[in-house]
Amino acid sequence: MNSAFKILLAIVYAWNFGLGLYTPLFAIFAQRIGADIFTLSSIYAGYWLTAGILNIVLGHFIERFEKENIMAIGFLITAVTCFFMIFINNPIELLISEISLGIGTSLIAPTWDALFVAFISQRHSIEESGYYEGGVRLILALASFLGGAIVSCLNFAALFLIIGITESFCAGIIVIAKPLDMTYFHWKSKKSIP
């Protein structure tokens, strides 16, 4: 397992940790701020529509930029959104935040996936995919438990603060790793996809 792949794993583990803290509690949070079942499902659909459409549309434009910068911007968008979520009081604000999270996800996910494909070992592809798939599921299990514990012991504001810090951490990993060794993420390396 090369260094670039390890960094990509650290990023996806941290990202999914943040997602896992909140996702199981989304419905409870939405109901607390006044969303009924239809509103809640519409807000959630807003996230998926935004992320889905922008994954396709932005995929054409992202190729022109350095992939690590695009990912870092996506993480910063999700971090700022999570900090904003501390102050959400109604379903409209939640819809805006979910759309914003969809924008961040549309910058992060396809870029991360492309780098994953570029840096996975062809000789150990199943083993390394196992670290990704299994690791993410273990992280989500831990995060789901911890998210419930944080909200039970503290509140949603504390949860969103922790998620915002986690998302900022992801952007930080990229910024720190980039100058250490440009081959970690440099798209024009020999390992990159044409």
Image (tube, rainbow, N blue to C red):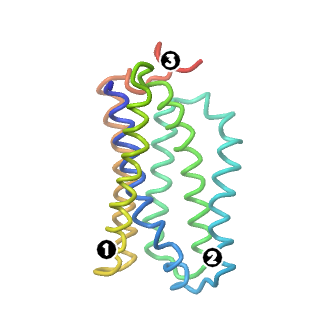
**Residue 142, position in %: x, y?**
33, 61
Task: Give me the disc on residue 188.
Answer: 3
Q: Is residue 73 above or below residue 6?
A: below
**Residue 25, position in %: x, y?**
46, 73
Q: Quadrant of the N terminus?
A: top left
Helix, strand or loop for disc 2: helix
Mark 2 neighbour density, 10 Å: few (under 14) some (14–19) many (20 or more): many
Say which label, 1 or 3, has the lower sequence index: 1
Mark 1 neighbour density, 10 Å: few (under 14) some (14–19) many (20 or more): some
Say which label, 2 or 3, has the lower sequence index: 2
**Residue 164, position in %: x, y?**
39, 60
Q: Quadrant of the C terminus?
A: top right
Q: CA distance from mark 1 to mark 3?
A: 42 Å
Tag count in the figure? 3
Q: Residue at x 41, y 52 (%)?
A: 137
Residue at image mark 1: 150
Instruction: Tell which tag, 1 or 3, sits nearer the viewer.
Output: 1
Q: Furthest-top residue in view?
A: 190
Mark 3 neighbour density, 10 Å: few (under 14) some (14–19) many (20 or more): few
Task: Give me the disc on residue 71.
Answer: none
Helix, strand or loop for disc 1: helix
Residue at image mark 2: 40
> Residue 48 appears in which quarter of the rendering?
bottom right
> Residue 4 appears in which quarter of the rendering?
top left
**Residue 153, position in %: x, y?**
28, 81
